[in-house]
Each structure stands twice: as C-alpha cells, then as structure tokens.
Image (cartoon, coloured by chain):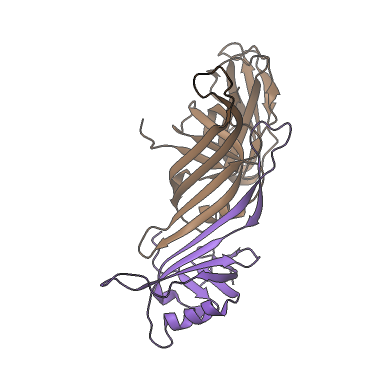
Chain colours: A brown, B purple
Amino acid sequence: MILNNTKIYFAGYNLSGDSNSTDLQLGYEEKDDTTFGDTARSVACGMQAISGAVSGFWDAGTGGIDGNLWGKLNTASQVLSVSPVGTIGSSVYACKSMHMQYNFGGQIGDLLPFSAAFRGQGVASVKGTILEISQKTLTGNGTGRQLTDVDAGQYLYGGMHIVAVTGTNPTLDVIIQSDNAITFDTPTTRLTFTQASAVGAQWLTPVAGAIADDYWRASYTIGGTDTPTFTVLIWMAIQ
Amino acid sequence: MILTNPYVSIGGSDISSYVKSVTIDYPFEEHDDTAAGDTARSVELGLANWTITVTANETYANGLLNDIMWTKYIAKAEVALIIKINGGTTSTDNPKWTGNGMITGYPPISGAVGDQAVANFTIKPTGGVLTRAEAD
C-alpha cells in the first residue's frame, strides 16, 4: 500500500498535516540465550524498546507544530498514536512516550524542515482499532464493529486525542461499550474517559479480561452551547 | 514555509546577512530508568544537550564575518544567542530562541579551489537551555 493518509497524533496535536515521514520502532531487545547443544545462535526477546520519529515541514503561529512540539519537550507519558491507513476502523499503534529531541533548520530557499524523536515510557505499545476520527458535534453512538473478545490474561486498552475544541463551555464524555451483537441491545460500559473540555489526550488504565463480548463502539455525550464541537481520535485495543 | 530570512545573532553580532543555513538540534540525554513492573523499556530525560549549527558565506575583509567570529571563537567565552526563522521582528509566527553557548567549532578555511568559501559554526550549551518566546 502507499502511505498517503497516515495519521500521527501526539498528545493533543495532529501532526499529520505537517509531516511527510514517520518511523515507529516497537522492537524487543535481543538477549542471547544460546546454550550447549544448540546448533545455531538462539535469541530471546527482552523488554520492548519504543522509539518514534516524525519529520516534515516546520510552522509556527497559534496552534502550529512548533509551539506544540516545543511545549511538549521532556514531558512524561504523552500519548503517541500512529495509524498507517488513518481511517475509522483501521489499525492504530499507540504508546506512552516522551518527546526527547526536536530539530529544525535548513538552507536559505528551502522549505524549512523539522524532525522530532520520541521514546517509550515503561509501558508496552498496543495495536488497536480506530473507533472515531472526526469532528463530533452531537451526542450519539459510534459505529459498532466486531473485533474480538478479551481473553483471560488479556487487557482492554483505550486512548483518545482531542485536537480541537470550539463552543461555549464545551464538555465531552466518552465511553467504550461492548455487546454480544451488532445491534447493541444490552451494551456494557467497559472504559470511561475523564470528561474533557479542552485539547489533550488520555490513555486509560487497562481493564483485565475476560470479557466475552466481541462487538465494540464508542459513545459520546456532548455538552455546552454555541455548537460545541470536538475533533477527536478515539481508539481501543485488546492484547 | 520557505526559509528565506533567518535572523542569527551570536555574541551580540547580527550575522544574518552572511547566513546560508541554520539548524537548532535540541535533544535531551537519555537515561534508562526501567524498574520492576515495567512492561517496556523506560527512559528518563536528563540534561538538554543542544547544538546550533550555522553555515555562512565566509569573508575575510576587515570588520566582516571572519573578523567578527574568529575573535569570539578564540576568546573561548560564553556568547549570547538569538535565532529567529523570519527576520528580526519577534511574533507568534516568528518566535525567537535565546540562550548562551560556546562556539566549539569554526574551521577558518575549508574548501577546494573554485569553491565558495563557507564558514561553519558549531555552538554548544554552557549549562543552560534555549528559551522560546513569541514576543521580545
């Protein structure tokens, strides 16, 4: 596939429109466990070492990439979510990260580039599914979709980025529900995000399985006046 | 945006008219603070270890770039830095980065016959961070 709609969200900012390249490394440290009797080198996987990089075109101004990236330097446990396809229902890779390097500058006459580097924060990354990636102005339920159930030993994860908020006294309450049928006749709330009223991001404490349901959706309640609007990315993961 | 008019001041000298390129690289040193209970490697950030690199059109005439910068370089003294992306007027769209650093590299001549003479400055911190501001 051609990467042409990749979405990159860091904390409460959507870097996608500023970026033209990204690299997410979610590998495991190699530990040699070769022993007598082996006929080839043997490797065990150690801890996951998470690193990410984004580069693109520098921009300042209110809400621009420069202020956002500079403001988040050396700030612990920021949510980084990257979706190669970038559409609702597609995969997203997410981790808790720290922005640890910011680089910008270039030649006279060039488009001014930037690059940013991120490192993991002691929590393994997850691969999940985008439940919502759009503007929300009305209270409602998102599209239900069949994923998998949560086995014993697995956890249910949820994350949310809010990258734009308008309206007067806007509030957003998001829950993630499950059911055993696409009709969601008897939905059960599995994850509840903290009420949001501003740009930001949340990474919820994972919920342990087992959960037998395999249909999932996000539901949201919007409060406020003057057409409160939230631009969000909401994802969930089971692993 | 196209970089056309960066502002670079080093040690109180505005050398913008000589500048061909300028880059701020702002990394923090990484320290492993992984502990029992973590499920992935954890990194704590230590000291900022930034670098500013400037490439400029070199000129050796009295009072011009080489005269200005060589004096600062061999003084091995802390220099004040001001970098802006688009001219001297600080604004939301043209933030400024300020700080203090040491010129740690300045080859006085580098090039082959027929090349444009260029000066490459490397500036490292002297214990302090760079500060970003959207107004003077």
**Near-viewer residue (A199 or A109):** A109
Q: Which residue is drawn at the image coordinates 66% and 65% (left, top)? A: B127
The image shows residue A88, relative to residue A70, as above or below, that is above
- Identify which residue is drawn at 49% across, 25% down: A89
Q: Is residue B3 left or right of residue B34?
A: left
A159, B41: nearer the viewer: B41
Q: Residue furthest left?
A: B114
Q: Whole-percent x and y of residue A37?
A: 56, 16
Residue B55 versus residue A67: which sits nearer the camera? B55
Placement of A164 over or under A220, stated as above or below: below
Image quadrant containing the N terminus of chain A: top left
- Residue at 64% x, 46% y is A168
Q: Residue at x 57, y 13 (%)?
A: A183
Q: Does any portion of residue A78 appear in the rendered image?
A: yes
* Image quadrant in which you'd find residue A36: top right
What is the tally of numbered marks visible in this picture? 0
Q: Is residue A105 above or below residue A188?
A: below
Residue A69, percent across and down? 56, 52
Residue A73 appears anywhere in the view: no
Specify whether B93 is left or right of A192: left
Question: Farthest right residue?
Answer: B36
Quarter of the image with the C terminus of chain A in it: top right
Q: Where is residue A79 shown, x and y percent of the image?
A: 61, 39
Residue A179's quadrant in the figure? top right
The picture places residue A166, in percent across and down from the top left corner, at 58, 46
In the current view of this chain or complex, which residue is farthest to the bottom?
B62
